[in-house]
Image: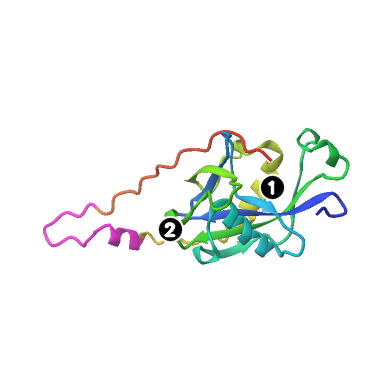
């Protein structure tokens, strides 16, 4: 389903964990990493398409996430001609996307990359919110930057205080030294490879 200008309606998904890190999926049988995304079917709203794609690509259902925000308008990118099937050239120009910012309310173990018979990803990891754009295929970088920038103001505040309490921190008693909370470690590796269309 293309619009008059040759753009296919699509949704993109930025999925956050409780540390405001984003889900980064490795496309099946490649070294390319990207956000979940997919086409909007005839008769679907962008929100319906987002929940369908979220289940198909990541295995999550609506009860596992909370919608924080979405982009106000369509964000477009053109696909270079050599990536377009020969029979579609001249008609298909690229994608127009509504991007959703979601927070995972479930657990990491709720994710299932094999939720359907046609998986998109064969691995995933949490990555810093500002993913290195050089890891994104060149013709998508502008849209990734626009989506991340527009949605960044909606990032939830992280409550460090509760984390320290769960870690067993207690106030120092008189005469005891309290060195304060230990810094949180980050174990997320930078993304590799280049996502495909």
Q: Outermost residue, left direction?
A: 175
Asked if residue 141 lies left or right of residue 96, the reply is left
Residue segment shown in magenta: 161-179
x and y, in percent, of residue 102 in the image = 55, 60
Is 178 magenta? The answer is yes
x and y, in percent, of residue 49 in the image = 67, 60
Q: Outermost residue, front direction?
A: 117
- Labels 2 and 1: the sequence-earlier one: 2
Nearer the camera: disc 2 or disc 1: 2
Residue 155 in sight here: no
Majority secondary structure of magenta residues = loop
Mark 2, residues whose alpha carbon is within 10 Å: few (<14), some, or many (≥20)? few
Residue found 61% across the figure and 51% down from its top: 148
Residue found 49% across the figure and 38% down from its top: 190
Vertical side of 11 occupied by 133: above or below: above
Q: Which residue is mark 1?
A: 143
Label 1 residue SS:
helix
Which label sits on residue 107? Answer: 2
């Amino acid at each position: 389903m293309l619009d008059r200008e040759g753009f296919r309606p699509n949704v993109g998904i930025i999925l956050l964990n409780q540390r405001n890190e984003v889900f980064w999926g490795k496309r099946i049988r490649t070294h390319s990493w990207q956000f979940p995304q997919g086409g909007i079917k005839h008769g679907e709203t962008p929100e319906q398409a987002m929940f369908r794609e979220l289940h198909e690509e990541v295995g999550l259902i609506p009860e596992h996430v909370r919608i924080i925000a979405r982009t106000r308008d369509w964000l477009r990118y053109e696909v270079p001609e050599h990536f377009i099937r020969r029979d579609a050239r001249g008609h298909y120009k690229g994608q127009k996307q509504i991007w959703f910012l979601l927070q995972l309310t479930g657990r990491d173990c709720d994710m299932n990359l094999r939720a359907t018979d046609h998986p998109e990803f064969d691995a995933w990891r949490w990555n810093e919110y500002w993913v290195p754009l050089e890891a994104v295929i060149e013709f998508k970088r502008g849209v990734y930057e626009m989506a991340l920038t527009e949605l960044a103001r909606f990032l939830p505040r992280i409550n460090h205080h509760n984390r320290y309490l769960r870690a067993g921190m207690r106030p120092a008693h008189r005469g005891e030294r309290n060195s304060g909370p230990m810094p949180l470690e980050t174990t997320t590796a930078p993304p590799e490879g280049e996502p495909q269309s």
